[in-house]
Amino acid sequence: MTQPTPEDVRAFLLAHPDFVREDAELLAVLARAGGEEDVIDLGTAARDKLLEEVRQLKALNEGIVETARANLATQSQIHMAVLALLEVDSLTALDRKISSRLTGTLGVDVCRILIEGHAPLRKGESILGASEGFVSEILGKKVERLGPVDPDTAHALYGQQGARVKSQAIVRLDFGGHDGLMALAARDTQLFQSGQGTELLNFLARAIERMIVQWLHAS
């Protein structure tokens, strides 16, 4: 392969000036080229400061883009999960769908819908009954809680899988007079963290809440 000549490089840079402008390190080297040693060049110092600001803004922009992509992916997952749940025609079918399709779509290991004072299914996998006051025991007065799994309540929430999951997201539910909650848990310690946005999580919870209510009092 023939090495480019200085004339070739010059011609390329003249035709593509953005190649230099968009490379902060290369621009910095060119800006300093030809300067005398031991001489304070205020112009160069100002350019260096500007270039550092450009680097920081570029990194910030890349972070924003990556976050936006992650948010869109999560939104797509939630929408797909809700659409799948809307296909069911009974509480039993919804229970099975939550245990399989929902957990797989969201990338969690377990999902529980617990309803105080009401166990609508004899052999439910995900939609289960709970004792009176259980929701307040888990959430207190909060509407939601995200973060590490509490080992003291893990078994009550997730059964045998409680010993394996590490992070969780819990949302309070209202089943027309029966308090309840939706609990998602995963082995991934970073999947659910305090401070994460919960708009999509609450959308999923409200959708499940409405689907269950239509069958709850008829069961």
Image: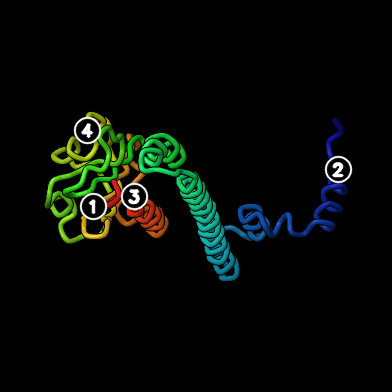
Tell us which disc is closer to us: 3 or 4: 3
Numbered disc in front, either 2 or 4: 4
Residue name at image x 33 percent, y 36 percent: 110
- Which of labels 3 and 1 is toward the front? 3
The residue to which callout 1 is attached is: 180
Amino acid bearing label 2? Thr
Which disc is residue 215 wearing?
A: 3
Residue 180 picture location, percent across and down: 23, 52
Question: Residue 195: percent from the left, percent from the top?
Answer: 32, 57
**Image quadrant of residue 158?**
top left
Q: In which quadrant of the rendered image does the C terminus lie?
A: top left
Quarter location, residue 40: bottom right
Q: Earlier in the sequence, mark 4 or mark 1?
A: 4
Nearest-to-viewer mark from 2 and 1: 1
Q: Is residue 98 above or below residue 71?
A: above
Q: Secondary structure at mark 4?
A: helix
Mark toward the start of the polypeptide (2 vs 3): 2
Residue 46 x, y percent position in the rendering: 56, 69
- Callout 3 secondary element: helix
Q: Nearer the viewer, mark 2 or mark 3?
A: 3
Circle 1: residue type:
Gly
